[in-house]
Image (cartoon, grey):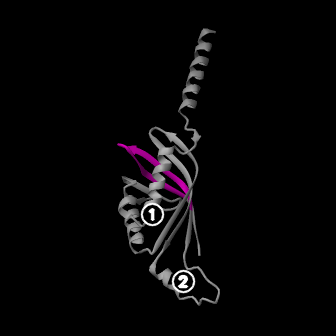
Amino acid sequence: MQRKNAISISAATFLALCLSSVAKAEPVPPAIQATYAKMIKAWDGRDFKTYATFFAPNFVMAYPESKPVSGAKYLGEVKAQLKTAKSASLKVTFKNATVRKGIVDVEFETTRIIVTPEMQAKMDAQPKDGPQLSHIPVFHEVGVDSWKKVGKNWVKVKTFIKSMSAVM
């Protein structure tokens, strides 16, 4: 009889420990919201040097059905885009955050625009009195950014894009 109670207590203790370690959805921490604001400002200002500081050296960009992209490759692509862009815009909507062992996972939706010189030329060439067509793709992404505090700063260690679409 005592043995049965000991097992029940052990199972209850184990269950309590498991439940206490489960990550819970919560609002995005203010420090990470402030970091996003700085990152968005860098993107919108086409300031690649500042934008790149928000990514850990081992950053990985992941997509559902393709191989992960290294941070170096991702940032190389962004650098080329921002260097030639006439304008850029990034809007982020937070869904929630999950905190686990020093990592904060932020679920998000973004709307991202980059206007290249070619796109701008096509828009400028449209007749002023005719229908105005957009030659600018608007990218919509849904995903999760994983942030880690390094020293005094929060940096992205991984972005997982759950879905992505582009509309002209």
Q: Which region is colored magenta? A: 141-161
Quarter-of-image position of residue 51? bottom left
Where residue 7 is drawn, which disc sits there? none
Residue that appears at 53% across and 88% down: 125
Where residue 43 is drawn, which disc sits there? 1
Q: Position of residue 63 (x, y in %)?
A: 50, 59
The kind of secondary structure element at disc 1 is helix
Does the magenta run of residues contain 146?
yes
Q: Position of residue 133 (x, y in %)?
A: 61, 82
- State the residue in front, 75 or 133: 133
The kind of secondary structure element at disc 2 is helix
Quarter-of-image position of residue 79? bottom left
* Cβ–Cβ under 8 Å for marks 1 and 2: no
Q: Quadrant of the C terminus?
A: bottom right
Cα–Cα span, label 1 and label 2: 22 Å
Residue 15 lies, with reference to residue 76, above or below; the image says above
Say which label, 1 or 2, has the lower sequence index.
1
Residue that appears at 37% across and 43% down: 152
Viewed as shown, does residue 23 lie left or right of 158? right
Residue that appears at 60% across and 88% down: 128
Most common secondary structure along the magenta stretch: strand
Residue 106 lies, with reference to residue 138, above or below; the image says above
- State the residue in front, 126 or 148: 126
Residue 76 lies, with reference to residue 54, above or below; the image says below
Tag 2 residue: 123
Q: What's the amino acid at mark 1? A: Trp
Q: What's the amino acid at mark 2? A: Met
Q: Position of residue 21 (x, y in %)?
A: 53, 32
Q: Quadrant of the N terminus?
A: top right
Quarter-of-image position of residue 150? top left
Does the magenta run of residues contain 79?
no
